[in-house]
Amino acid sequence: MKDRDEIAEKLAASGYIADPELATAIALMRMLRRPLLLEGEAGVGKTEVARALAAALGTELIRLQCYEGLDQSAALYEWNYQRQLLAIQAHQGDRASEIEDAIFSEKYLLERPLLAALRRDKPPVLLIDEIDRADDEFEAFLLEILSDFQITIPELGTVAARSIPHVVLTSNGTRELSDALRRRCLYHYVDYPDVDREARIILARVPGVSTSLALQIARMVEAVRKEELRKTPGVAETLDWAAALVGLDVRDLHDAPEVVHETLMCLLKTREDSARFKPEVTARLLGKVA
Amino acid sequence: MSCCGSPITCDEMNEASRRVAEKLSAFMKTLRDNAFAVGLREGRDAARLIAEGYAETPALLRSAFKHLFSARKADWDKFDGLFDAFWLGKRVRSRSAVRGAAKAADTPSLKSLRDAAMPQAGGEGPLDQVATPEGGEDEAAGRSGEGRMEGASRAENLANVDFRKLADPDQVEKANEAAERLAHAMRTRLTRRDRVSRRGRRLDLRRTIHANITHGGAPITLLRRRRRDKPLRLVVLLDASGSMSMYTGVFLRFIHGVLDRFHQAEAFLFHTRLAHVSDAMRERDAARALDRLSVMAQGAGGGTRIGECLATFNRAHAARVINSRTCVMIVSDGYETADAKLLGHEMAALRRRCKRIAWLNPMMGWQGYAPEAAGIKAALPFVDLYAPAHTLASLAALEPYLARI
């Protein structure tokens, strides 16, 4: 309970303008020791949540970026074969068992993100980014780690977690995740921020922007998102646009409709969208923005 | 909760917590009725949340429970309503409505789809001038349809019934679901193509060392890894013109299934112009996806311009969506209302780009159909597979072909 208010304060202090429910999610995640699954459109700031959490908790962020074909040796650990081979050459006179003990020790172990997250003294934030891009097999393997928080390295034995990391998973929904994984996690749907929150994000992130301009930008972006676009602009695009407007010395969107239209193109990321977004469309949207 | 100052006896405490537990399990049952996947563990955690003081205000408890019990966007969206109905007694009527809505068949968007797929609803397509040649054959097909079924009951043997002849809305719904399931099954089988290889480019050090233990550690047998095969990419171009109106419903569901499961698949609709619909179709909820499409799928009127649409596709999309392992699947009856020469030309251009072109023609299942329309004649020389697609069985027959590519 108290934890929750504390987290909300710390998130705010670290510069992340959080949706109020997110603080609840994070408090629950710490209390129940469950991973947090964040879903939402690309560009709503899912990855940013993990960053802000790490900053708020004052701990390390360990990131595992998933991709198709990601396997254990890239996610968990790998032996440093080159060094091992060198060591074997160097110790050629020694007894075989000694060499073996030497080369299968921690010195020759390359930590990958998952192992690294288990071996920290202070619980880190483990971000497993875009889990939907990884294969089904990897998801099953991850499930095992997330429930036991220990892994077995055949040559070394079982490594139990020194501290239980705070696990954040993100998914863009390019593939349906398994029910088992979903059930193990707390779920939070990250939506595009509403106008007020987006304006506050702009104010926090873009230096030199006035409150009225930030509000105008946020309203305009909200209007753009309601258009049928192939790629809906995310928060990062909003910030880029705000920075562009500030750089071009625009104080009020209504003063410079042409500049608004031209810079608006940095919100649009596909050819079709830019082709559809004629100056008239900008003018119409601008008309709605008070 | 230790916040209360007034003395409570042990019995009263037990009584209170028993009531809370009962209410909680009733709530979890409601959630299960509404397709939430909640188990014992969630129940335990929920009880813990209450004990930790999250029950202080309803809004806080709702937010906490929402994170705990939801597992997907659909859960997330309907949770607030369920919570309010159960714990706060608000909008009790809407709760029962939520229960009913779990049956997807009742949503309006599905109904509109069903109508679109129903043969009797043919009149709603404004493009009947294109469909005129069907008139005569329709009856012939009807007769032959009876003959083909050989006594099997129509309700049971959906696989071999022409989609056109599905009159009962329930049957149409079943066929749509089957099409979607089929698409799912195709994906899982199609992409399971990686094989252990000894001819890869990269050395697999770990396996090499292990394999060479017998040689005293000297690397004699080298093991290699090979990258996974690029999975097959599927691009579906669906003719949504009036002449196809009886089939579009089923194919839309099929495409929805394909897009849901293939990592790399794109879908386009065309009638007089081409529309890129992958994003709309990626909507997880089939009903909503089809809702978003209903406008695009209607057709603007004025026939089918396959050639022009293919030209648009080649110019604007092909470079992005086609790679060397792409199969382009065109679902159309091939009734071109514009110049057939252009169609031939564009088919040739498409042929040079992709791995395979499959043309699925629902009309092929009709008795006495011959590819005589100018459009299909111009296109056929460039097509690798020309197959019927009027029943579920004929859709299923595609899978082995795609798996070989």
Image (tube, grey):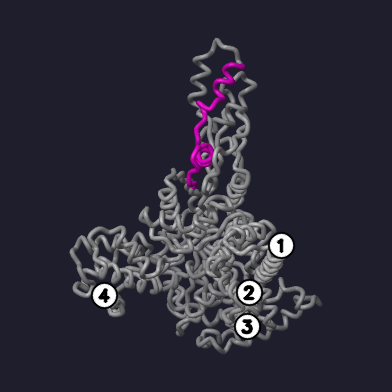
| Residue bearing the label numbered 1 | B14
Q: CA distance from mark 3 to mark 4?
A: 47 Å
Q: Earlier in the sequence, mark 3 or mark 2?
A: 2
Q: Are marks 1 and 2 in contact (CB under 8 Å)?
A: no
| Residue bearing the label numbered 4 | A279
Chain bearing mark 2: B
**Residue B385 appears in the picture as rendered:** no
Which residue corresponds to the image point at 55% horizontal and 70% vertical from the top-left?
B58
Are callouts 1 and 2 both on one chain?
Answer: yes
The amino acid beneath tag 1 is: Asn
Crowding at label 1, few (<14), some or many (≥20) Cα neighbours within 10 Å?
Answer: few
Crowding at label 2, few (<14), some or many (≥20) Cα neighbours within 10 Å?
Answer: some
Which residues, given as a range, are shown in magenta? A97-126
In the image, which is nearer the foreground, mark 3 or mark 4?
3
Element class at badge 1: helix
Rendering coords of residue A134 (x, y %) = 54, 50
The amino acid beneath tag 2 is: Phe
Left or right: where B309 falls relative to B174: left
Q: Earlier in the sequence, mark 1 or mark 3?
A: 1
The amino acid beneath tag 3 is: Arg
Rendering coords of residue B274 (x, y %) = 44, 73
Q: CA distance from mark 1 to mark 3?
A: 33 Å
